[in-house]
Image (cartoon, rainbow, N blue to C red):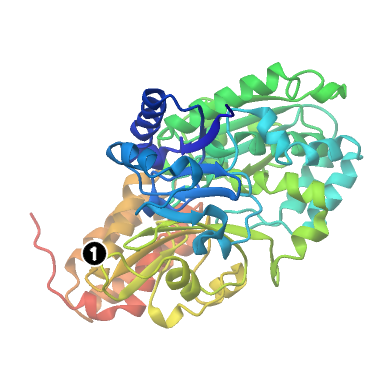
Amino acid sequence: MTAVKVFVPIDAAARSVGADEVAAAVQAEAKRLGVAIELIRTGSRGMFWLEPLVEVATAAGRVAYGPVTAADVPGLFAAGFLQGGKHPLLHGKTEELAFLKRQQRVTFARVGVVDPRSLRDYEAHGGLRGLRAALAMAPAQIVDEVMTSGLRGRGGAAFPAGIKWKTVAQQPPGQKYVVCNADEGDSGTYSDRMVIEGDPFLLIEGMLIAGLAVGADQGWIYLRSEYPDAEVALMAAIDMARREGLLGKSVLGSGRAFDLHLRRGAGAYICGEETAMLESLEGKRGMVRPKPPLPAIAGLFGKPSLIHNVMSLAAVPTIVEKGGAFHAGLGVGRSKGTLPFQLAGNVKHGGLVEVPFGMTLRELLYDFGGGTASGRPIKAVQVGGPLGAYLPPAKFDTPLDYEAFAQAGGMLGHGGIVVFDDTVDMKAMARYAMEFCAVESCGKCTPCRIGSTRGVEVIDQIAGPGPQVALLRDLCDTMTHASLCAMGGLTPMPVLSALDHFPEDFARGARARG
């Protein structure tokens, strides 16, 4: 009897709502009934309101059931779910679900599909094609493809990746590093975690290609300390990659060396800034370094270093496999390719949506997100993490691309989107932004360290238009232009956007001092 393949996510989000218990229940029920199954733990498809999502491979394709609890499992078997039988939790063919069908998954093409612990499964679904192509190319050709692709760093600055690659590659021969910033700390973000837990070999392949391109034989991954499941998945993938000759002294027998080192982050938001991360990697306190020199010239241990986050490196294998022109053909304007947007907060259908740049924020919030979970009107959306602007409904028709968002007074950042309904107090949210900066500041520069503390005090004194609002704006101006890094420089963005778009929320009484 051929075993039926049953897929249950091993993603941290799915596990948090009972995926492990569901997997165990499926195994136990199959054993009790004498039914042959092959249970495969995958990444998440990113439809969090349906987790735990259980999929079954049928002759017609994979079908989805969810959200499944352990108590539902006997009823699923009784309904013939191994053959795609009807059940109240049945959603039909997974790929036909509207939430997935409207996406264009490039980076996330394998996440939720493959077994993240199997290099063979990764290859069977197109993995390593980019690496093999890169091994047949000269380093300068690889850099040229990245330049052609128009890839920009999938973080706050959105700096052109090809320029970084070219700068590192042009440094004199010697020790160089590829550094992956996986310290994903922005509110409402989880795409890095989902790739690491659901398709870790993609990140490894991207770092390998980067090493070949710039002449680096070592890579470092700085992983967020609050991601224990991702750490387990990544360590297992690295160990397997070494055993299979993917990492080591001769990558796939090419004679070219590359190996990876994993380091757990220090639990500080500031270490998401690339130079503070380098300090932490070197065993020092995570504090921002002044520039110049740029990390591309003098980075980790003083050596030329190519630094990217997970999403940037995960885009590389497809760029090399299909050509830079393929990537450049997606998106709009100078925003090329796709970006995995992450819907969180008060949203009906929270989850990950990968689409080319150019869709409007409104389409994302309503066509994918379904509006608020509370059913109340959306009052504000914060895009780009805790330092991103709070945007009102009047801004929802802004296209999701870097330049359009900058013109609208915001930033896309890592693609995290947090939704608030009309019960939110935007004065409290502005205060939170300042308080967050005060807590997370590395303390190196006065505008950030002291300005954020004074900002909290000033907001507490505001009770409508007046000198305190003017003082807050003046303080924000100082932080924007005098802070050493983006931590202090961007903290005014959510504060000023709250003041500009929701002035009525600042008319309430001042907070009593205690």
The amino acid on which the numbered mark 1 sits, given as a three-letter code, is Ala
Say which residue label 1 marks: 428
Tell me if residue 273 can be seen: yes
401 sits to left or right of 461: right
Q: Residues within 10 Å of mark 1 (few under 14, many from 20)?
A: some
Residue name at image x 34 percent, y 57 percent: 451
Residue name at image x 68 percent, y 49 percent: 315
Seen in the picture, residue 514 relative to 422 is either above or below; the reply is: above
Q: Position of residue 136 (x, y in %)?
A: 91, 37
Query: Which one is in front, 99 or 35?
Result: 35
What is the quadrant of residue 427 in the picture?
A: bottom left
> In which quadrant is the N terminus drawn?
top right
Query: Which one is in front, 298 or 49?
Result: 49
Mark 1 falls on what kind of element?
Answer: helix
Query: Which one is in front, 180 or 195?
Result: 195
Q: Position of residue 107 (x, y in %)?
A: 64, 50
> In which quadrant is the C terminus drawn?
bottom left
Seen in the picture, residue 335 relative to 221 is either above or below; the reply is: below
133 sits to left or right of 242: right
Q: Position of residue 27 (x, y in %)?
A: 41, 27
Residue name at image x 62 percent, y 28 percent: 118
Callout count: 1
